[in-house]
Image: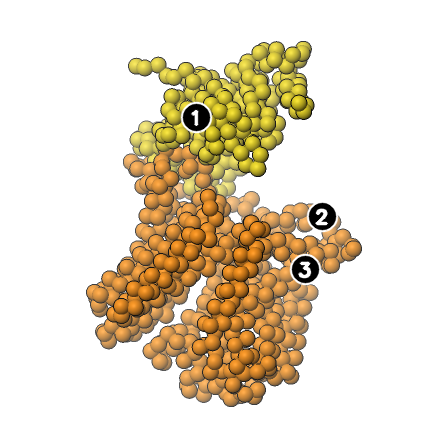
Chain colours: A orange, B yellow
Amino acid sequence: MSQPGSLAWFARHESRLAWRDWLSMMTAGRRRRLSTVVIVLAAFLAFLHLVAYPIVKDYAHVARAPDKTALVVITGMLALSWSLMASQAMESVTRVFYSRADLDLILSSPAAAPTLFAVRIATMTLATALMSLLLASPFINVLAVLGGARWLAAYAVVVAISFNAMAFAVAVTIALFMVLGPKRTRLVAQVMAAVIGAACVIGLQLAAIQSLGSLSRTEILSSSALVAWAPASDSLLYWPARATTGDLTALAGVLGAGVLLLGAAIALFAPRFGDCALAAGGVAQAAKRRLSTSNGFRQATPRHALRLKEWLLLKRDPWLMSQSLMQILYLVPPAYLLWRGWGEGAGAVVVLVPVLVMAAGQLAGGLAWLAISGEDAPELVATAPVTAAEVLRAKVEAVMGAIALVFLPFVAAILLMSLWHAAVTVAGIVAASAAAIAIQHFFRSQARRSQFRRRQTSSRAATFTEAFSSIAWAGTAALAAAGTWLAVIGGLFALAVLLVARLISPKP
Amino acid sequence: MSLPPACAVETSGLTKRFDRPVVDNLDLRVRTGEFYALLGPNGAGKTTTLKMVVGLLKPDAGTISILGTDALADPVAAKRVMAWISDEPMIYDKLTPLEYLAFVAGLWGVDADTAEARAQALLGWLGLGGHVHERCEGFSKGMRQKVALAGALVHDPRVIILDEPLTGLDAASARQVKAVLRERVANGGTVIMTTHILEVAERMADRIGIIAGGRLIAEGTLEELHGQAGERTSTLEDTFLSLVSSEAVPA
């Protein structure tokens, strides 16, 4: 038995909580579903291997000492992974400060808080690494099967990158706390996390549009202009790429650097976590008095009142607004593509339609969660003399209204170029949004609006089906925009995704 | 003008099971214009009963009538005359009290001018007059509970159902809430309230129902309950404990 309050004791406590949290998340709180979840997860991973094959097959035979082009492409992909991991890590660190959970208990106990926070940073690193390994495994496995076991070194590189990303996230979040204070850090850190996560993808896409006129990230990474501009092949910058291809010296260096950085971050910043958490705890108690001169009384039907309430709550919450609109960041490259391709016919529009449909589905999913699951006064609404169907209808209208507001300018721009493509875009946006709302309705579970960021982890099934649905509708719209009858098959597949979501959703 | 039904709330054979029967064949009759306190130990089925009455839970069996309306057949009509307040005030942090009341009035379809006048009066009466344009996010628990209470009253319900409304309130806030409820009853409204504060039930309720194991084990005025306890008890606390403990003895 470990000594209470010791590193090992906290580690055991944290790992037990993490395991139960994960189990509950994967099974939606029903332990009996575990075997089903394992089967679905295995099927999903198998499917990802099929997806990975066409993407990585050309790189499998890259030599252990790759040429500069291969080094640039692999480094670019690793940078993308790092940005996503850093984003996820920043999100986790911020959550530790602001979601009180057991912090009041621990900080008021005589146990050494830095020990707990050291363990907590390690647990977050482990969670980030495990998720990344899971998602990277299909790509690494395909490379290993086609190109040899040396590619398995990529697993260790993923772990090293996650160490590095967590060290970065801890340092940046603590720095934000010290510079901005606890009030602003939450919003800034989460916006920063989203921007870091999106910046790499968006940057590569913008560069691809600028130089190649396409949205392809790999094309820009292997372009001769970028390769010529990149540092020489013997640069230290390429060590992670070399390690990925099986260079053991580089692998030792990358792993060592990761361990060193994470260790330094824990040693330096774990003792500061307690102060930050205490400061964050005081924010809610010192909520600023915000005045509003409107009184809101107007002749309204219940549906109208519900719609107005949803819009007002969204408008009043800059954090929620930023979280929802963050998904719109991904529209920047296609908007730029549209602008560049203006007047050159429908070529650019065909590329743009699925991107818009996809973004609409994702945004609608987030807004629908807020309206349906994130209702802060569910008993008030449920005891009002309004039927459940009418409440749902009002909430759907509120979400669709917001979607229309965001996407109307894009549709108007497309309309000026092609009536057919504008019609396809509208149909795709409506279908993807409606499907996302339906999925959120199937998987509805009562939560506070402030738990918005947790929505994607509270039900993985809802998250995956929502993503699949948006992808399926985007694919359908792309086929329709290209004028092929195959769009019908795409549409049927999208409907099948919705049906599966209905079947696997918890029964009320 | 027709007379109001004699029973404001009437349940018959009301039953709800989760893992075990939580409410078991419950017959409850609350008269129009009375203050009815529903007491019982933790897990007795009080909240479940009230949640079924206000339409937050579906009963497995039984009927519910609200002022003569079958609440299961026509829930919207039944909800029109009722208000529900739970121990945890559920309001919107980002709205001001006035905006919250405007939203509630919209849900109940109250005329805007009437609702605004009522809202101003209620908030003033509850001591929130100086905070009507402030967002609720910085409010204390007592202030939030008062906003929720004002929301419940803004549509002028004829039946008010409250689940532990005084939990966490300071003495002054609790007194204000009690005064509001007393005033509603004086004006012909019906109040049903669960509470663990027996002194409140003793002083405010016209009749008291004691529920244990999902069944109504005793009901009546304070004197009638003393009689039902079958022994010389001087306070409601003694009577309550006596009735509940005798019920807990296995058959």
**Residue occupying image coordinates x 34% and y 54%:** A434
Q: Around disc 3, counting alpha carbons within 10 Å, would you say few (fewer than 14), some (14 to 19), or many (20 or more)? A: many
**Residue B175 against residue A212 in the figure, above or below:** above
Q: Is residue A377 left or right of residue A493?
A: right
Which residue carries the number 2 mark? A109
Q: Around disc 1, counting alpha carbons within 10 Å, would you say few (fewer than 14), some (14 to 19), or many (20 or more)? A: many
**Residue occupying image coordinates x 42% and y 52%:** A502
The quadrant of the image that shows the N terminus of chain A is: bottom right
Residue A296: x and y in percent read 35, 39
- Marks 3/2 in contact by CB < 8 Å: the verdict is no
Residue A471: x and y in percent read 39, 64
Give me the disc on residue B64: 1
Q: Secondary structure at mark 3?
A: helix
Which residue carries the number 3 mark? A119
Amino acid bearing label 1: Ile
> Which one is in front, B202 or A129?
A129
Amino acid bearing label 3: Val
Residue B142: x and y in percent read 53, 33
Question: Disc 1 to disc 2, how far (Cα)?
Answer: 50 Å
Question: Disc 3 to disc 1, how far (Cα)?
Answer: 54 Å
Is the residue at mark 3 from the same chain as the one at mark 1?
Answer: no
Amino acid bearing label 2: Ser
Q: Chain of mark 1?
A: B
Q: Secondary structure at mark 2?
A: loop
Q: Around disc 2, counting alpha carbons within 10 Å, would you say few (fewer than 14), some (14 to 19), or many (20 or more)? A: few
Question: Disc 3 to disc 2, how far (Cα)?
Answer: 17 Å
Residue B179: x and y in percent read 49, 21
For residue A308, say whether it is visible.
Answer: no
Q: Is residue A436 left or right of residue B13?
A: left
> Which one is in front, A239 or A396?
A396
Q: Chain of mark 2?
A: A
Q: Chain of mark 3?
A: A
